[in-house]
Image (tube, grey):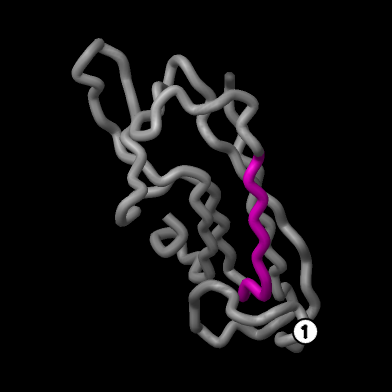
Amino acid sequence: VGKASGLRYLSFSAALCAYVGADQGCCEEVLVRDTAQPSSGFGNAVASSHPIMETRSLFFAQAAQQLSKDLLYINREAQPRGARAVLIDVLSADDGGGGEAQGGAGDAGGAGMWAEELEAGCY
């Protein structure tokens, strides 16, 4: 979405690596936890037209234990939630590059502004 909209600087962190599956024992929607070699993720993404200087992630503790090691029952348990903060270099001249931040706030010559994205949900 970021690239399609022209926002070349992207940052993502997954609160949950899983894919949509079906539980054989009943007829309810489940997510299959993708833990062996995660290839899918649900989480927070931030797209920016300015370079991202630094990123931070916060993952919230689950109030209740998981019902299953391999499955997440969407209608019966809370999905993992998190927050993503990025320090954006708002004064730098965009060099046409792209990507996620590698260094800390002191590595860039411009002025930074923190932006945060919180993944909200219903329980």
Q: Which residue is drawn at the image coordinates 67% and 75% (left, top)?
A: 53
Residue sitting nearer the eye, 37 or 7: 37
Position of 121 compared to 106: left or right?
A: left
Q: Does 40 sit above or below residue 102?
A: above
The quadrant where residue 118 appears: top right
Picture coordinates of residue 109, whole percent (x, y): 75, 88
Say if 49 sits above or below 29 in the image: below
Which segment is the magenta one? Answer: 51-60
Magenta region includes residue 111: no
Question: In the displayed image of the protein, which residue is found farthest to the top?
Answer: 26
Q: Toward which corner of the image does residue 91 lie, by quadrant?
A: bottom right
**Residue 2 in the image: x percent, y percent?**
46, 59
How many labels sit on residues?
1
Q: Is residue 77 left or right of residue 111?
A: left
The chief SS type of the magenta part is strand
User: Residue at coordinates 55% horizontally, 60% vertically from top-left?
Assistant: 47
In this figure, which residue is indicated by the disc labeled 1? 106
Residue 65, given in percent of the width and then of the height, sits at 55, 26
In what quadrant of the picture does the C terminus appear? top right
Label 1, secondary structure: give it: helix
Q: Give the residue displayed 39% in from the left and 33% down from the top.
A: 69
Occupied quadrant, residue 23? top left
What amino acid type should be assigned to the residue bearing mark 1? Gly
